[in-house]
Image (cartoon, helix red, strand yellow):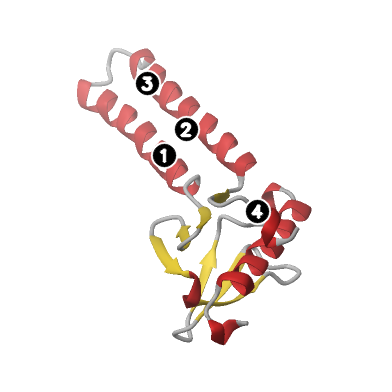
Amino acid sequence: MSTAAVDLPVTWAPRRNRVVLLILCAVLVVLFAVLAVALPDNWQFNDRVMMVGSGLLFAAVGLMLARPKVTADADGLTVVNFVRSRRLAWAEVVRVNFRAGDPWVMLDLADGTALAAVGIQPAGGRDQAIAAARTLRDLVEHRGGPAHR
């Protein structure tokens, strides 16, 4: 896919993972709430509150795992990983790497560091991940600074 065919902004995210995780989070919250209500009478109120809290904690972890995405717009990239987000100008990204066996795309940055772009990963389909990585690579080559062309 050429960069001319890409309408910006574009977002890549492992959608299948996200759907499964969001459903799982909802099920966990409901399950733990039902368990808290259905506990035997010898369980105290604090135990029931902790049961609901445990469900909410597990759901929070699931929501954190559902966060990753990569968004490209006219000014650069926004990489959202499990805990952190980072905004990058196009000129900051030197290369897009996605080798066989890699769990997700790695971005080589102009400052000599690398940044995982977890939003593009083969878990949602290897072919889609490869196509997304190629599109991102083409965007980086097309939109990067003069030193990157």
Identity of the residue drawn at 62% across and 71% down = 142
Residue 72 x/y as whole percent: 53, 57
Could you say whether the residue bearing mark 3 is in a helix, strand or loop?
helix
Query: In the shown orientation, is residue 145 left or right of residue 123?
Result: left
Q: Looking at the image, is mark 1 or mark 4 nearer the viewer?
A: 4
Could you say whether the residue bearing mark 4 is in a helix, strand or loop?
loop
- Mark 2 surroundings within 10 Å by alpha-carbon count, few (fewer than 14), some (14 through 19), many (20 or more): many
Query: Which quadrant of the rendered structure holds the N terminus?
Result: bottom right
Q: Are marks 2 and 1 in contact (CB under 8 Å)?
A: yes
Q: At label 2, which amino acid type do we have?
A: Cys
Identity of the residue drawn at 48% across and 86% down = 112
Q: CA distance from mark 2 to mark 1?
A: 7 Å
Q: Which mark is residue 6?
A: 4
- Mark 1 surroundings within 10 Å by alpha-carbon count, few (fewer than 14), some (14 through 19), many (20 or more): some
Q: Earlier in the sequence, mark 4 or mark 3?
A: 4
The residue nearer to you, when weighing 141 against 61, is 141
Q: Looking at the image, is mark 2 or mark 4 nearer the viewer?
A: 4
Q: Earlier in the sequence, mark 2 or mark 1?
A: 2
The residue nearer to you, when weighing 140 against 64, is 140
Which residue in the structure is indicated by mark 1?
58
- Mark 4 surroundings within 10 Å by alpha-carbon count, few (fewer than 14), some (14 through 19), many (20 or more): few
Q: At label 1, which amino acid type do we have?
A: Phe
Q: CA distance from mark 4 to mark 3?
A: 45 Å
Could you say whether the residue bearing mark 1 is in a helix, strand or loop?
helix
Residue 75 x/y as whole percent: 45, 63
Q: Earlier in the sequence, mark 2 or mark 3?
A: 2
Which residue in the structure is indicated by mark 3?
33
Q: Looking at the image, is mark 4 or mark 3 nearer the viewer?
A: 4
Query: In the shown orientation, is residue 122 left or right of residue 75?
Result: right
